[in-house]
Amino acid sequence: MSRTPRTAPTPAERPGRTPHAPRARRDKHNGRNGRIRLAAAGCALLTAASAACQAPGRADAATRVRQAVERLGEWETVSATVRVEASADEIHAFLRREHERGDGPAVSRTDALLLSRMETAFVFGSDRPLKDLGDKDRLDTAAAVNFGNRDVAAYKSVGADFYVRADWKRLAHETNRSRETVVRAAGLARSADSLPPSLAAARDMLEGRWVQMDPEEFDHFARAVGGKYGERAQRLANSVDVLQSARAQHHVIGAVRRALEDHAALREAGRADGTERVRVTLPAREVADGLASALAPLEERFDGIGFSWLERAPDRRVTAELALRGGVLSGMTVDLTQFTGRTDAGEVAGEMEEIPLTVSFAPGSAVPVKAPRGARWLDPQDVMAAVLYEELGSPRP
């Protein structure tokens, strides 16, 4: 379901806390790290590309790209919508080949179908134009996922507060009941009405309403509803960090900026239907090495997960295409097969179809970046109590 962001030129509101304010948060990390690499990359592109394009010898195309990014950065809120523009069969064949080469996990046909249908909308917002943000300014963020219809999962990071919402029944249907955690939560949702008033927050979570929670405690929630997803949940908890620390956000942005300044080459790629295209070419291995070195100080906040994925970057140049429309950056497309272990051009033409990843940019909010009204505070023990209540089959008191 394609989104049409709100484009009214008013600053994004910075809402206060809900009546259900959280307890004091632990601050054992000075900086917070990245939730989803695409979110960090989209944010970094908006703030880093203009500086990267100012290097000598990059007039014309580079100048227009810089101006296009600056015009988008004049807004307080910007949306980025991410999709894989390939069929389920193409995605499945691509990922199966990578698995057979030892370059990735086994992926089912259901996974490939989900990837072909999934659309994720990210929103980055502030109380001032994005291009004017300083090293101590942080972004409020939001995201929502859908599979061609209504949203099935979403989060918001507003100030120091974090909110989540999931439609468990719809998720179970969309994933063909292939995820244990989702299936368990969907089962609990069917009997959520029987939960006592003391478990109102757990009932809201199971019935798809917004709840507020501490992301560091995702692992407790996952163990309660799924039993064996602690490691994945801890990874999700750690990756929320970049959303809630200006220091971590700007560290990632700075690393991307340096990689672009040192290695990017831009050239014009034509114009059609009012859209100008610019091709950006980068040596993947050198950029990955530079990013890994620059991001090393954040490694400890990932509990060993870190940036090992950068080590798998190919030793070749890779290309992305930027779209400029009306003088504003409107999109970016990159062929994911460039990042595989293939070794020759013949394999590209004969065996492997392109798998384009597209990111569409627009001023305004595809997802409102403000605290949801009435969101209750959810503790892990509330979820555990709801699971126990359902298992015991207790009637409402």
Image (cartoon, rainbow, N blue to C red):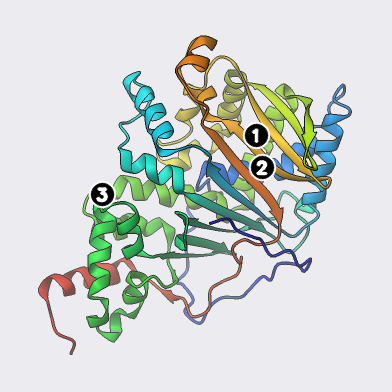
Helix, strand, or loop for circle 2?
A: helix
Between the C-alphas of marks 1 and 3, the distance is: 37 Å
- Say if mark 1 contacts mark 2, CB within 8 Å: yes
Does residue 37 appear in the picture of this structure? yes
Q: Is residue 224 left or right of residue 83?
A: left
**Which residue carries the number 1 mark?**
255
**Which residue carries the number 2 mark?**
44
Q: Amino acid at mark 3?
A: Ser
| Picture residue at 70% right of the left edge, 61% below the top | 364
Please tell me which of labels 1 and 2 falls first in the chain: 2
Disc 3 or disc 2, which is closer to the eye? 3
Disc 1 or disc 3, which is closer to the eye? 3
Disc 1 or disc 2, which is closer to the eye? 2
Helix, strand, or loop for circle 3?
A: loop
Mark 2, Cα crowd under 10 Å, few <14 / some 14-19 / many 20+, is many
Q: Amino acid at mark 2?
A: Ala
| Picture residue at 52% right of the left edge, 51% below the top | 120
Q: Quadrant of residue 367?
A: bottom right
